[in-house]
Image (cartoon, grey):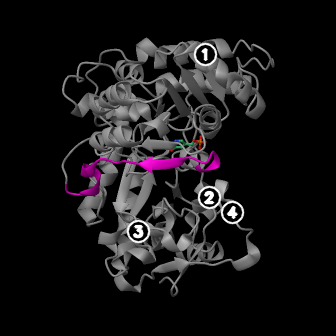
Amino acid sequence: MRISREEMLAPTDLPFDKVPPYRVKVVEYTEPTTRDQRKQLIKEVQYSACNLPAKYVYVNMTTDSGTSAMSDRQWAGMWLGDESYFNSKSWEPLKKALQEFSGMEYALPTHQGRSGEAILYEAFVKEGDIVPSNMHFTTTRAHCYYYGAEPVDMTCKEYYDEHDPSWFKGNIDVEALKQLFIEKGDKIGFVELVVPNNLCAGQPVSMQNIKEVREIIDKYKKRDVIFSLDIARISENAWMIKKHEAGYGHMSCLQIVQEMMSYADVSHMSAKKAALVNMGGFVTVRDRTNYMRLQPKLIRLDGFLTYGGLAGRDLEALAIGLMEGINDYYLEDKQRQSDVFANACKKLGVATYNPACTLGVWILAEHCLPHIPKHQGPGTALASQAYIEGGIGLTSMDSLHRGHLDPDDPTNYAKIQLAPFELIRCAFPRRVYTDSQYEWCAEALYKAMEWGDKVPGYRRFDMGDARPQLEDRDFGTHTFFDEFEPLFEHP
Ligand SMILES: Cc1ncc(COP(=O)(O)O)c(C=O)c1O
């Protein structure tokens, strides 16, 4: 390992707001396709970009999860992996990194984000509870249903106004949270804040908002309450705080993360995102008794306390990747690349949700294909057409895919409510694509949009009895199984 963490952050006048702080050592070739092939391929997989064989997706922005390029430092670290079952020596550097990153004494490795959530929700969420959040991610929502609790999303009002110029549109609505505690505090034992708010166009959460949640919990709680941070991309949230929240410009992103964490009782991370590994996760815990509550659950679900479902070499890669992912120069460059893509879209008239955040860019499909009504999935339609045009993979988060479940009748498809925006998520696999590839994605979206009303709307495809009925407790996962079909052929 030739370069240390400190050396990576040495003072510089190199412009990392213009160029990346790293260079490329290994490249991966892609399999070229033609437009005709792509049209056929997407038809064969029922027009779902997520079902496409990945080898046929040229620029794959369907997800940033587990898709990072690891550094030479991480690959070198993997050779040091100790594969002992109990107390692997590879746990030591990771434990130390987690304590430093989180400021919490206790940590548990997990094989990915959702297995960490599973032990937390099993330990702290009871049947009949309400679990408020700024917007639950799919899996924490699913855990709520699984334990008979109600996930309640309380995204701030600014998010619902696409023209609102605020920087922190991922916040929780603190007034609504306070009110909920006053009225139903006896049912609240767990509060989940997702930083940044992945399902709300990746919008960040401000330090002020996190502080206020802590204060509300302390002042209004009617029973023990755990304040949990879902930190899959916390480093990227920290960059937005550094840049746009008064009083943080002089701090390193690591210091900002440490302050964010200082308000929480636990955190859980899908390390497949901002920690720059292809597999891994963890939970951090402030209180010893709570940590001990989680131990038996981790052992039952994931593995022993010092490996949690990961190989020794994965622990090594994670310890290094976590700290590379919080490097200020790297984050500056990541924001720069987001801006390159967002600006390329804007220049071509492809509408984006503003502001573009550090983790990726969200397209407002309703403005790109205004002839398609919300219930016919303009995001689904635009994403399919953009694949045909440019071989790019995007994830639709429109009303068809992400309409809200009726809280009083969550298993009834007919009652799914329209989403506030017809979003497409363009996620950025970290350290993987070049600026020109992102510019190509903007061009593919533009070409798709240019077809206008020749692009079809969609409807839900009813599989009838071919798919077994989802059990109520499994319902939160439905977006991964739902199928749709276009009303007529794509051009
Ligand atoms: C905000 C957030 N939380 C949790 C998860 C779950 O993580 P994993 O996929 O590692 O189980 C994800 C994954 O996509 C996520 O985006």
| Residue 76 visible in the shown view | no
User: Which residue is nearer to you in this view: 293 or 46?
Assistant: 293
Q: Which residue is mark 4?
A: 470
Tell me the amino acid under the disc marked 2.
Phe
Write the residue at 39% across / 35% down. 236
Look at the numbered discs 4 and 1 and tell me whether their residues touch, using CB distance below 8 Å.
no
Q: Where ligand 1 lies, by image quadrant? A: top right
Tell me the amino acid under the disc marked 1.
Thr
Tell me the amino acid under the disc marked 4.
Leu
CB of residue at label 4: within 8 Å of ligand 1?
Answer: no
Q: CA distance from mark 2 to mark 4?
A: 6 Å
Q: Secondary structure at mark 4?
A: loop
Q: Secondary structure at mark 2?
A: helix
Q: Which residues are magenta?
A: 145-163
Q: Which residue is mark 3?
A: 418
Q: Which residue is mark 1?
A: 289
Q: CA distance from mark 3 to mark 4?
A: 22 Å
Q: Secondary structure at mark 1?
A: helix
